Image: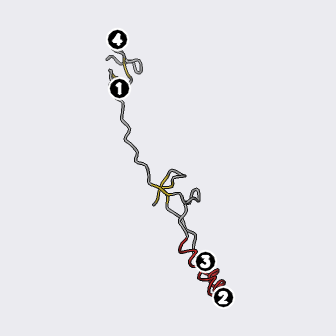
Amino acid sequence: MKYCINCKQTVQPAKSGFNVIAFIILLCLGCCPGVIYILYHVLKTERCPMCNSINWGVQPIMEPVQQQVVKGIFCPNCGTRINEEHDYCVGCGRKV
C-alpha cells in the first residue's frame, strides 16, 4: 500500500498486466520488439488506481484532536446542560 499525494489516501498501486499475445506477435516480428516490450513492462512505474498518477509520498501524521472540557452541571437523566440558576432541566423537566 502506498500513499497518493493527489488523492490524499492510501491505495494499492496498479500495474497493467503483461499481454502474452502481444509479446508473441512482437517476438515474431523480431527479437528487438519482444525485448523492448519486456523491458517496458519491467521498468513501468506503478500508478494510482484512483487518479492514474505516479505522485507517491509519505502519509502525513494526524495530530490527535484535543477534546474540549465543558464545565457546568448536566442533567443525569437526558444530559442537557443546566444553568446554575435553574432548579429543573430545560430538556426533560427533571428536578436537579
Q: CA distance from mark 4 to mark 3?
A: 78 Å
Question: In the rendered view, would you say 90 is above or below 25?
Answer: above
- Going by the numbered disc 4, the residue's amino acid type is Glu
- Going by the numbered disc 2, the residue's amino acid type is Cys
Labels 2 & 1 near each other (Cβ < 8 A): no
Question: In the rendered view, would you say 60 is above or below 87?
Answer: below
- Going by the numbered disc 3, the residue's amino acid type is Asn
Residue 93's quadrant in the figure?
A: top left
Q: Which residue is mark 3?
A: 19
Task: Look at 60% across and 81% down and name the residue there.
Answer: 20
Q: Position of residue 3 (x, y in %)?
A: 47, 56
Q: Which residue is mark 2?
A: 28
Q: Position of residue 46 (x, y in %)?
A: 53, 65
Q: Which residue is mark 1?
A: 70
Task: Look at 66% across and 88% down and name the residue there.
Answer: 28
Most extreme residue toward the top is 85
Secondary structure under the numbered disc 2 in the rendered image? helix
Labels 4 & 3 near each other (Cβ < 8 A): no
Closer to the eye: label 3 or 2? 2
Q: Position of residue 88 (x, y in %)?
A: 36, 15
